[in-house]
Image: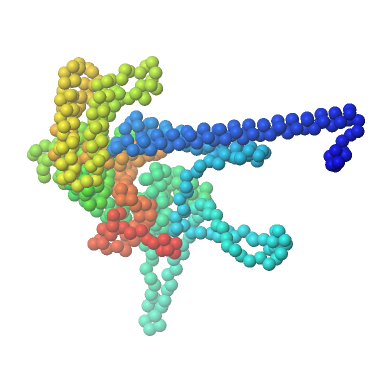
Amino acid sequence: MSNATEELPEDLSSALALLAQERARRIAAEAEAATAKAEAASANALVSHSEALIARLKLEIDKVRRELYGSRSERKARLLEQMELQLEEFEADAGEDELAAEIAAKASAVKAFERKRPSRKPFPEHLPRERVLITAPTKCACCGSTKLSKLGEDITETLEVVPRHWKVIQTVREKFTCRECEKITQPPAPFHVTPRGFAGPNLLAMILFEKFAQHQPLNRQSERYAREGIDLSLSTLADQVGACAAALKPLHSLIEAHVLAAERLHGDDTTVPILAKGKTDTGRIWTYVRDDRPFGGLSPPAGLYYASRDRRQEHPERHLKTFTGILQADAYGGYNPLFKVDRDPGPLTQALCWAHSRRKFFVLADIAANAKRGKNAAPISPMALEAVKRIDALFNIERDINGLPADQRLERRRKDSLPFVDDLQAWLQTERAKLSRSSPVAEAIDYMLKRWDGFTSFLDDGRICLTNNAAERALRGFALGRKSWLFAGSDRGADRAAFMATLIMTAKLNDIDPQAWLADVLARIAETPVTRLEQLLPWNWTPPTINAQAA
């Protein structure tokens, strides 16, 4: 007989008791296994649900991004932002649920859920690598032998950041005396942007970029530097900013001349509060953007900014005094003198923005906004919705011809866009006759019909764009920055902000890192002859090599 049989008790009562104990242990083990399996299955279900939501949201986001053209449609922009926020939350939920599933799986034999992750791109080659070697075993874990031979190695790369560190560069200038004439010889002192300056070009570029691109006022920068152990007062930083603006004026003049020599400009303005006695005035930041890429132009893009304390028409007249060409802008009346026949040196060609006209119809047909208003929502205007659909048909054509040469764009527009425009005009005139003067849709229709020549000028010139989005994008930074710096402290402060925005935006338009460009320009501008200053412009600038920067 087996050992198990020999261990059975001889009396029946003891055997029954032993059987009952074994049955109880088996039931408890089965219950514990079922509980662990249920927990793992529940965690897996959560992760699977999150994965499905993430996949669906990614598809929806890609779809909305493909549909966006020119100025981002208000409804689509809000929808995209909302979906991206949801995606962020679902990604975080999926990571949390994945960890919970892994913990549950360790307590049971149920296989953990493995989340499908997107393939990670390799880290850039220019980043320095630091090898951390894990000490290898000195003997075999199986037999204990010390005769080990290296077979290879596995490397795991982890991206890490080194906190910013400060250093002081000591520039030594040795003195020599002549044994013959006793004259002392010494190299000249290094260039500093400010007289008796102490800040290096990289520090100055960081201060400028933080203030004018990241919208971090100098007092906040000073507080952050103090926490890092560096005492740079507000007045000290302000002094450096003013000196840098003076040193960079030659480059600003070159960019200004380049922008005003364009065949076509995008123009727009936005409000900027400027400090006054006991209040703030509603000042303006004006922008003029040269971007020939939509019609295949080879000239580099650039942005030009000006500041003013009001919005009088004399400002755009002064800004564009020497400009002759096409001005793409909204229907602001201050531009009207620029289009007069008797203007010297000649009238500008007006090109109005279809995105502005579309927006007037869109607010009357915004289904998403109405849903949020609930009972207080105004009824959706079918006429406005139809106008939006007709205008969107033009945008679809423009999407296909963007980047083509001007003559090809014009040919496609006369073939495909002209019938849409003619039908739209006839439809607007017919529908306008049905509306009263006080109708909101009538206001939107009148806005277009009264300025029809400006809206249809794109049918006569392939260089003209359908929208003025380039200028609106250029002003987006000021719209966001107002929340941080609240107001400009003076007229000169607003002018300085416009000055630096010209440099920074031009670098961005040419896909150049503004901070790296400013640092290199500040280091070289004193030694660069006036005849070679164009080499420092963003579209001509060559970044220093990685080795040179490290040295």
Instruction: Give the total number of marks visible in the rendering.
Output: 0
**Residue 302 in picture, x, y percent from top left:** 27, 48
Q: Position of residue 233 (x, y in %)?
A: 45, 49
Residue closest to the eye, 34 or 183: 34
Indicate the colouring scheme: rainbow
Q: Residue at x 36, y 24 (%)?
A: 369
Along the line of sight, which residue is nearer the eye, 246 or 98? Answer: 98
Q: In the figure, is residue 319 to the left or right of 220?
A: left
Q: Residue at x 37, y 61 (%)?
A: 544
Residue 171 sits above or below residue 33 on the image: below
Q: Please give left or right for residue 259 compared with residue 342 in the image.
A: right
The one nearer the camera, 10 or 283, is: 10
Work out whether 323 lies above or below 282: below
Name the outermost residue toward the right: 11
Residue 245 position within the rendered picture, expressed as x and y whole percent measured from the top left? 32, 51
The answer to whether residue 140 shows anywhere in this view is yes
Q: Quadrant of the C terminus?
A: bottom left
Identity of the residue furthest to the left in this view: 342
What residue sits 62% from the left and 58% below the top?
Answer: 134
The answer to whether residue 482 shows anywhere in this view is no
| Corner quadrant of residue 23 | top right
Q: Residue furthest bottom?
A: 180
Q: Residue at x 33, y 48 (%)?
A: 508
Residue 21 vs residue 258: left or right?
right
